[in-house]
Amino acid sequence: MNAPLEGLTVIECSLLEPGQLGMILGSLGADVIKVEAPGSGDYSRELGWPIIDGVSLLHWHVNQAKRSIVIDLRLPEGAEVFLDLARRADVVVSGMRPGALDRRGLGYDQLRAVNQRIVFCELSGYGATGPYRDMPSHGVGFDAWAGCIPPAVDDQGFTFIPPSPSIGTRVGAVWGAMAVVAAVMRAQRDGVGCSIDIAQSDAAAYTNWIVPEGNRAYQRPEPEVTGNPADGGLRRAPGLGGSGEAVRYQYYRSSDGHVLFMASEREFWENFCRGVDRLDLFERRPGMKYADHAIGDRELRRELQEIFEQRSTADWVRFGMDVNTPIARVNDGHSILDDPQFLHRFPWLPAAEHGTDLMPVPVKFVGEELPAPRRAPEHGEHTDEVLRTVLGYDETTMSRLRERSVVAG
């Protein structure tokens, strides 16, 4: 079967992690043409670590599934080449500061003038509106702003950035891709495109929705908004911030690592106690039917810690499946590489074909195989190919554009 987005043409102008939006679309079959500036182009190739064969992992990952063409958009002829691409495209993605293409005379109004059905998606840091619109930032800044990564403190009193999954940059691209596909469906139905504004900071805040929405709810009087009934109505901090004193929903040390115990339902708690031959624990503290974390019960917490330390993490995972109680393996960046579930769900895209070993996108079409994505391109690697096959330029036109430094690569 054809790839889901085969036939969709996407023109992308992006730097760094916003390039994941185009990567997602490309991995699902779209033809993503990455337009880069002369010189070094997208400097994701040289930013961050690790560096594989002289090229950053950031580039290998976010720019896979794309072709690269170099166009100097500062030149009028370069702008015309870009508009020629837009005439034949379904989508234009801008992954830079708000208004970057507008400043080149290539904003949504100009794109719509040559292609009424074009979908324009601008993925930026803080969005195209608001007091932070033009604020410079990196990805961790969006998560810090959204309250997702509070500062940690070391033993000398210095604050530092704790490990974080970089929510805004990764989830922002997913929301952008979903919005693009929805807008393309409407454009195919109604014949009219649109302009989409996606902020990575918005994505971080929305992903963490339970914290701002929970705190907003707590601004109302206590008789109207209480906490968890299993806690006696205590107003715990929303989300995981309120889990520090949880007992039946908590991390525990195993004999060789850590597990996450999640027996907050009475049924799961009873199954656990029966499985470890400690039904006395359940009889003494049966808890409520749902969402009972046994908050603050340090005595029970000590007993559970002693129990969990007697078996390995793998043993506890098997035990949880056997007795029907949720116990998860707690991985880090090393241990997950050997996790059987990870290995089953993420067959590596091999370095020999993709520059470095990469994880496939987490989308599975049952009974089908997605095509392997293109290897992340060199700067301007596909300039001639795109000019010839997409725009139909002849050799004379292409030579003239090169001589005038309109295109390169």
Image: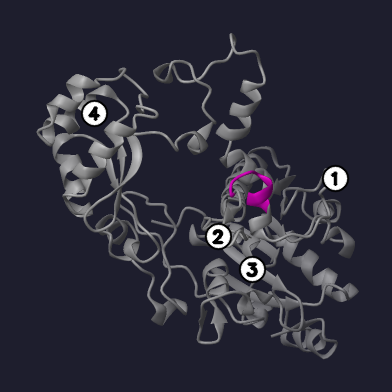
Residue 391 visible in this rendered orientation of the protein:
no
Disc on the earlier residue, 3 or 1 = 3
Q: How many marks?
A: 4
Name which of mark 1 and mark 4 comes first in the sequence.
1
Amino acid type indicated by mark 2: Asp
Magenta segment includes 146 = yes
**Magenta part of the protein: which range?**
142-149
Label disc, if present, on residue 269 of the rendered structure = 4
Q: How is the image coloured?
A: one colour
75 vs 57, nearest the viewer: 57
User: Tags 2 and 4 in contact by the CB under 8 Å rule?
Assistant: no
The residue drawn where x is 29% and y is 20% is 287
Residue 222 or residue 376, whichever sits in front? 222
- CB within 8 Å, label 3 to label 2: no
Task: Check disc 1 and report the residue beneath it.
Answer: 131
- Please name the residue that numbered disc 3 is placed on: 33
Give the CA separation, mark 3 to mark 1: 32 Å
Which comes sooner in the sequence, label 3 or label 2? 3
In this view of the protein, can residue 213 be seen by the observer?
Answer: yes
| Left or right placement of residue 228 versus residue 341 in this view | right
Q: Please indicate whether residue 1 sits to the left or right of residue 57 in the image.
A: left
Task: State the image coordinates of residue 215 (x, y, percent, origin top left).
Answer: 62, 28
Outermost residue, top side: 223
Give the residue pinned by disc 2.
154
Q: Nearer the viewer, mark 2 or mark 1?
A: 2
* Three-letter code, disc 1: Pro
**Label 1: few (<14), some or many (≥20) within 10 Å?**
few
